[in-house]
Image (cartoon, grey):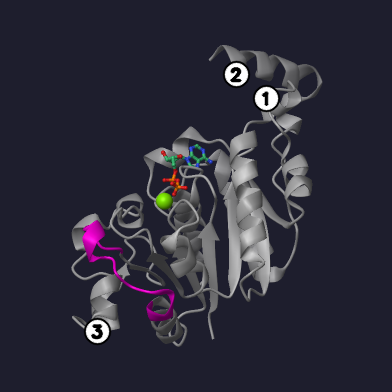
Amino acid sequence: MARCIVVTSGKGGVGKTTFTANLASRLAKRGLRVCVVDLDLGLNNLDVIMGLENKVVFDVVDVVDGKCRLKQALVQDLFCNSLYLLPSCKNPDKGQISGQNVRIVTERLSRIFDYIFLDCPAGVGTGFHRAVSAADEAIVITTPTITSVRDAKKVVTLLQNYDLLSTKVAVNRLRGDMVVGGEMMDAFEVFSMLGTKPLGIIPDDDDLSFCFPGENDKDMLSDTAFEMIATNLHEGTEYMFDCLSRYTGFFGNIRRKIKRRA
Ligand SMILES: Nc1ncnc2c1ncn2[C@@H]1O[C@H](COP(=O)(O)OP(=O)(O)O)[C@@H](O)[C@H]1O
Ligand SMILES: [Mg+2]
């Protein structure tokens, strides 16, 4: 049986889709069979981020509607053969499926995969309910800004109404230079404000936007962070990426000044 995990947030644009694709590819590279399901119906993003847009023929709504078989809709990743995408539809009017519909699909996927990640749309409306009600566990993504954390708090409270095995938080786009300079909240403050178990910390990393997950062999700042998160999720550890020590001490101070000028 697969672990079926919804990746959600309150606020949009905090990095749910980027996180889903990157974490999934790290787990798949370990030989685990992973499926990412794009439930942001009408605003397909996962296929684009993974570089699979041109390979999409059917989508999750077609599967629910019986227009194709589940395996026909699955798209294999370009870089890792144990990673698959179940795409979202491009037309927002097409997406009339329920949480129960998605649950039936994830139960079928569960027989084939070790991990299923459901990439949730922003907000707490129908799309949120649809995704969360089909999952067993939740990961809440937030950036360390007050608006994002407040929305994440609302989501954490809402998630208590669902029958989930666990809810964990990942803080995305942390800037060590700004935390050390007192201009940004630290991830540990965010975890304690949300009162939820931490899953990980991801630094702000420009390189993340410019490569497909799994493609890059060069050292990205966020690489180690995603590896730690993959280990935390799979093995139950609590490794946290250290964004701060680069910017403390004599050389850290110089680095911070250079970064602030950039
Ligand atoms: N750790 C990060 N460092 C830098 N940019 C990031 C990071 N995570 C996400 N982004 C960027 O933020 C934007 C929104 O990310 P996305 O994953 O689409 O958010 P969401 O799915 O929550 O709407 C994208 O341009 C993405 O490249
Ligand atoms: Mg998204």
Please name the amino acid that badge 2 sits on: Lys
Q: Which mark is residue 23?
A: none
- Label 1–label 3 contact, CB within 8 A: no
Asked whether 141 falls inside the magenta stretch, the response is: no
Dividing the picture into quarters, in which one does residue 83 lie? bottom left
- Label 3–label 2 contact, CB within 8 A: no
Asked whether 91 falls inside the magenta stretch, the response is: yes
Question: Residue 225: x and y, percent?
Answer: 62, 48
On screen, residue 98 versus residue 15, left or right, reads left
Secondary structure, mark 3, is loop
Give the residue at mark 1: 177
Q: Residue at x 67, y 66 (%)?
A: 160
Mark 1 burial class by Cα count in 10 Å: few <14, some 14-19, many 20+: many
Mark 1 vs 3, N-terminal side: 3
Q: Residue at x 27, y 58 (%)?
A: 52
Secondary structure, mark 1, is helix
Please name the amino acid that badge 3 sits on: Arg
Give the residue at mark 3: 69
Question: Residue 212: x and y, percent?
Answer: 37, 49
